[in-house]
């Protein structure tokens, strides 16, 4: 059975910095040995043959700045060795472009810069690697062109083109933008749905058009207004700024700084604090109390450190900088 989803760009690269490799990288980066190296990533486009070196420099430059901001020692030589392993995986996975695609040096440059920036700020690792890093290989096949993968198709600024394999041979096909009552496959949250799952290109319903794909009959339905029905319980039916709660009706989300003392629900990016006021969710590394399960952005409050840590990923502050000298 299909599931209605809000499709977003798939993060293909997180595993480069997860698992055993991340553990070795972390243990070698911030430690008792101090070194003033670490380098500084250059801006601008990144030629394909320089991608590995530029990623290595960016990772260590970012981690160096993060560690030093937390007053922990930084070992540049050890960081460089571990970062090169991660960069090799990165290049092999996303910097090696398949046939019918072409390498985008501009996207690579932006990817490298954003990597460094996130690490340098000891930032929220839910955003790492940045989405732009999925776009290093651009499709070259226009609508009607032969394809075997979605990434081989040229993607438009709005909407999406899928590699339709339903006829037995792949053809780059524009996925229709669903209208009220149309059969549908997905709900899209913005003008672009990102790269689609390879499939027969059924229409998508766009929330920007006031529609969602209803799993009861797989057709595009109108988004429900304040007080409207959301009996699926998922909240997908509710218009922007609303959420599905008590009695399966759409309620107003309290804005940042707003009163959430009665229902306890805040707008995206905020949580209801103990005073009953919507407060901005805290990034990885920020002090937290654990009084709300939603207090931390993309993670949870670690009672050992009384700090927000990132779920399922590398947490720069807790894992890298907490082990310093």
Image: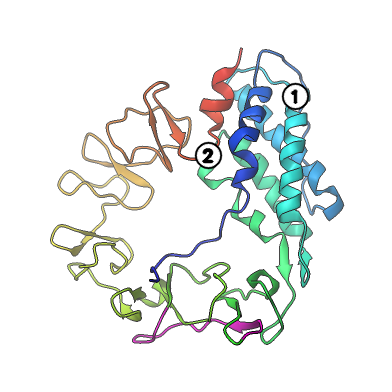
Left or right relative to 277: residue 220: right
Instruction: Say which residue label 2 marks.
Output: 313
Write down the region rendered in magenta: 168-184
Q: Quadrant of the N terminus?
A: bottom left
Relative to the observer, which residue lies in front, 311 or 112?
Answer: 311
Q: Residue at x 71, y 55 (%)?
A: 94
Q: How many marks?
A: 2
Quadrant of residue 173 within the rendered picture: bottom right
Instruction: Say which residue label 1 marks.
Output: 78
Q: Position of residue 140 (x, y in %)?
A: 75, 75
First in sequence: mark 2 or mark 1? Answer: 1
- Distance in Å between CA atoms under marks 2 and 1: 21 Å
Q: Position of residue 8 (x, y in %)?
A: 51, 62
Q: Position of residue 266 (x, y in %)?
A: 28, 49
Left or right relative to 174: residue 217: left
Q: Position of residue 76 (x, y in %)?
A: 75, 24
Relative to the observer, which residue lies in front, 205 or 100?
Answer: 100
Is residue 177 one of those drawn in magenta? yes
Q: Residues within 10 Å of mark 1 (few under 14, many from 20)?
A: many
Q: Residue at x 28, y 62 (%)?
A: 234
Left or right relative to 39: residue 249: left
Q: Is residue 144 above or below residue 85?
A: below
Q: Secondary structure at mark 2?
A: loop
Left or right relative to 9: residue 247: left
Q: Main secondary structure of the magenta part?
A: loop
Q: Residue at x 78, y 58 (%)?
A: 105
């Amino acid at each position: 059975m299909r599931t209605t989803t809000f499709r977003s760009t798939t993060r293909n690269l997180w595993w480069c910095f997860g698992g055993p490799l991340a553990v070795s990288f972390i243990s070698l980066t911030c430690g008792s040995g101090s070194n003033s190296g670490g380098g500084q990533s250059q801006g601008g486009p990144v030629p394909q043959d320089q991608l590995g070196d530029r990623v290595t420099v960016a990772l260590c430059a970012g981690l160096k700045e993060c560690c030093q901001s937390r007053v922990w020692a930084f070992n540049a030589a050890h960081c460089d060795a571990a970062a090169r392993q991660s960069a090799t995986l990165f290049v092999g996975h996303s910097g090696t472009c398949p046939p019918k695609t072409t390498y985008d040096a501009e996207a690579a440059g932006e990817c490298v810069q954003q990597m460094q920036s996130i690490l340098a700020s000891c930032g929220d690792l839910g955003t790492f690697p940045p989405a732009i890093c999925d776009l290093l290989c651009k499709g070259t096949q226009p609508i009607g062109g032969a394809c075997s993968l979605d990434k081989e198709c040229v993607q438009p600024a709005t909407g999406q083109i899928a590699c339709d394999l339903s006829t037995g041979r792949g053809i780059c096909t524009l996925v229709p933008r669903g209208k009220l009552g149309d059969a549908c496959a997905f709900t899209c949250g913005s003008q672009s749905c990102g790269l689609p799952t390879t499939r027969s290109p059924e229409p998508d319903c766009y929330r920007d058009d006031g529609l969602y794909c209803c799993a009861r009959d797989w057709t595009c339905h109108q988004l429900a207004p304040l007080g409207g029905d959301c009996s699926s319980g998922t909240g997908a039916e509710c218009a922007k700024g609303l959420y599905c709660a008590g009695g399966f009706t759409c309620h107003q989300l309290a804005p940042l700084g707003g009163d959430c003392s009665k229902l306890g629900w805040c707008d995206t990016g905020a949580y209801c604090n103990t005073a009953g006021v919507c407060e901005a969710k805290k990034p990885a590394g920020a002090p937290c109390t654990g009084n709300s399960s939603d207090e931390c952005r993309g993670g949870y409050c670690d009672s050992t450190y009384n700090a927000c840590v990132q779920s399922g990923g590398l947490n720069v502050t807790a894992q890298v900088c907490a082990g310093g000298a």
